């Protein structure tokens, strides 16, 4: 099992580094009207010191989601980086399934899916859904206002989380859901 974990970690680090290296090859300037740096949001998710499959998936989801949106926050992402992020996630998923197929099959079946009918490159995505979607949902709610609660408007105004982060989380959420919808 230790060799399997080492192999998966090596794949994760290799793919993260490829994205970071590509990321470093072009200048990024945050949009004038935004207080959010997408670069500052993505880079920590890919750094070796924070290497986690969930963070890698979140970074890939954000970069890949730029294909769905013409948002000013994501419009700077070049097609080659979008493609690299998407293919890197699917490569990691395939490598992960090669090592942890039995474990993944159990988790996927608990979610109501038959792993035989889910493409190999998307099975890791399903395994991550119970962890990632509640996390993203919470990020989205951090700056939302509940109109039924009068004090909520005031607390949302005091929120320390820029609305841009909520928008990025919504893009990530949509990417995950769209990936699942593509094979259901």
Image (cartoon, grey):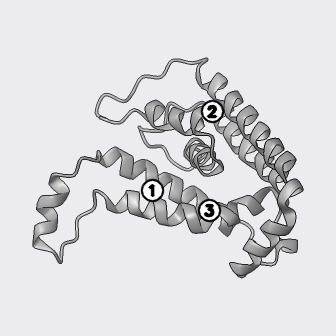
Q: Earlier in the sequence, mark 3 or mark 1?
A: 1
Q: What separation in Å lies between label 2 and label 3 (alpha carbons)?
A: 28 Å
- Of the pair 47 and 161, the residue shown nearer to us: 47
Assess whether mark 3 and mark 2 are in contact (beta carbons under 8 angstroms). no
Q: Earlier in the sequence, mark 2 or mark 3?
A: 2
- Could you tell me which quadrant the N terminus lies in? bottom right
Q: Is residue 137 left or right of residue 56?
A: left
- Could you tell me which quadrant the C terminus lies in? bottom right
According to the image, label 1 marks what residue?
170
According to the image, label 2 marks what residue?
48
Q: Is residue 24 left or right of residue 171?
A: right
Q: Is residue 176 left or right of residue 145?
A: right
Q: Crowdedness of circle 3 by 10 Å Cα count: few (<14), some, many (20+)?
A: few
According to the image, label 3 marks what residue?
178
Q: Earlier in the sequence, mark 1 or mark 2?
A: 2
Image mark count: 3
Q: Crowdedness of circle 1 by 10 Å Cα count: few (<14), some, many (20+)?
A: some
Which residue is the extreme one toward the front?
A: 2
Residue at image x 65%, y 22%?
21
Residue at image x 69%, y 60%?
125
Q: Is residue 17 left or right of residue 65?
A: right
Q: Nearer the viewer, mark 2 or mark 3?
A: 2
Q: Is residue 41 above or below residue 94?
A: above
The x, y position of residue 58, in whole percent, is: 57, 49
Q: Nearer the viewer, mark 1 or mark 2?
A: 2
Residue at image x 61%, y 17%?
25
The x, y position of residue 154, in whole percent, is: 11, 60
Q: Is residue 52 above or below residue 43?
A: below
Quarter of the image where one finds residue 46: top right
The x, y position of residue 174, in whole percent, is: 53, 59
Residue at image x 45%, y 53%?
169
Helix or strand or loop: what does disc 2 sit on?
A: helix
């Amino acid at each position: 099992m230790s060799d399997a974990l080492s192999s998966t970690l090596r794949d994760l680090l290799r793919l993260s580094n490829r994205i970071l290296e590509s990321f470093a090859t072009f200048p990024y300037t945050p949009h004038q009207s935004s207080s959010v740096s997408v670069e500052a949001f993505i880079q920590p998710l890919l750094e070796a010191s924070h290497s986690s499959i969930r963070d890698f998936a979140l970074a890939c989801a954000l970069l890949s989601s730029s294909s769905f949106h013409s948002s000013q926050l994501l419009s700077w992402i070049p097609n080659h980086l979008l493609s690299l992020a998407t293919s890197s996630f699917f490569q990691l998923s395939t490598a992960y399934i090669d090592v942890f197929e039995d474990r993944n099959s159990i988790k996927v079946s608990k979610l109501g899916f038959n792993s035989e009918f889910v493409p190999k490159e998307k099975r890791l995505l399903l395994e991550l859904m119970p962890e990632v979607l509640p996390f993203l949902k919470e990020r989205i709610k951090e700056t939302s206002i509940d109109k039924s609660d009068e004090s909520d408007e005031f607390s949302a105004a005091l929120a320390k989380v820029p609305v841009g982060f909520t928008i990025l989380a919504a893009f990530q959420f949509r990417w995950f859901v769209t990936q699942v919808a593509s094979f259901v």
